[in-house]
């Protein structure tokens, strides 16, 4: 897990960090504290290198088809 935190930082992870920090500051300034949950979600996704979509091939299904199907 430690290697995942500090390696493979791409543009999407950096954008998530910037979005999370911006949203968090905006939520605190405006007093919209429910937005902090979204800020925390983006921050967790950025640091863990995950996403709510199937990025990186994590949702690929195995190919169970046979080449010699009759």
Image: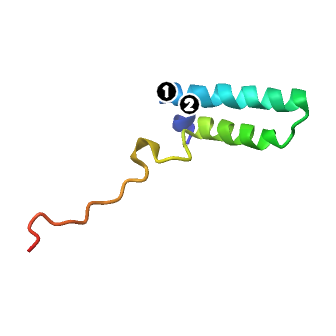
Q: Nearer the viewer, residue 65 or 5?
A: 65
Q: Nearer the viewer, residue 4 or 16?
A: 16
- Look at mark 1 in the image and give the residue it sits on: 10
In contact (CB < 8 Å): disc 1 and disc 2? yes
- Look at mark 2 in the image and give the residue it sits on: 13
Name the quarter where the C terminus is drawn: bottom left
Q: Circle 1: is it few (<14), some (14-19), or many (20+) Cα within 10 Å?
A: few
Secondary structure of residue under mark 2: helix
Residue 2 location in percent, x, y? 57, 38
The residue sitting at 46% across, 47% down in the picture is: 54
Secondary structure of residue under mark 1: loop
Q: Quadrant of residue 62?
A: bottom left
- Residue at the farthest right position: 31
- Above or below, 45 against 24 in this view is below
Q: Circle 2: is it few (<14), some (14-19), or many (20+) Cα within 10 Å?
A: many
The residue sitting at 87% across, 37% down in the picture is: 32
The residue sitting at 73% across, 27% down in the picture is: 21
Distance from Cα at disc 1 to Cα at disc 2: 6 Å
Name the quarter where the N terminus is drawn: top right
Residue 8 location in percent, x, y? 47, 30
- Above or below, 26 against 42 in this view is above
The residue sitting at 61% across, 36% down in the picture is: 47
Residue 19 location in percent, x, y? 67, 29
């Amino acid at each position: 897990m430690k290697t995942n935190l500090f390696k493979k930082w791409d543009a999407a992870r950096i954008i998530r960090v910037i979005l999370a920090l911006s949203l968090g500051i905006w939520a605190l300034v405006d007093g919209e504290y429910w937005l902090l949950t979204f800020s925390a979600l983006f921050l967790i996704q950025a640091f863990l290198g995950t996403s709510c979509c199937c990025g990186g091939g994590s949702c690929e299904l195995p190919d169970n088809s046979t080449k010699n199907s009759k």
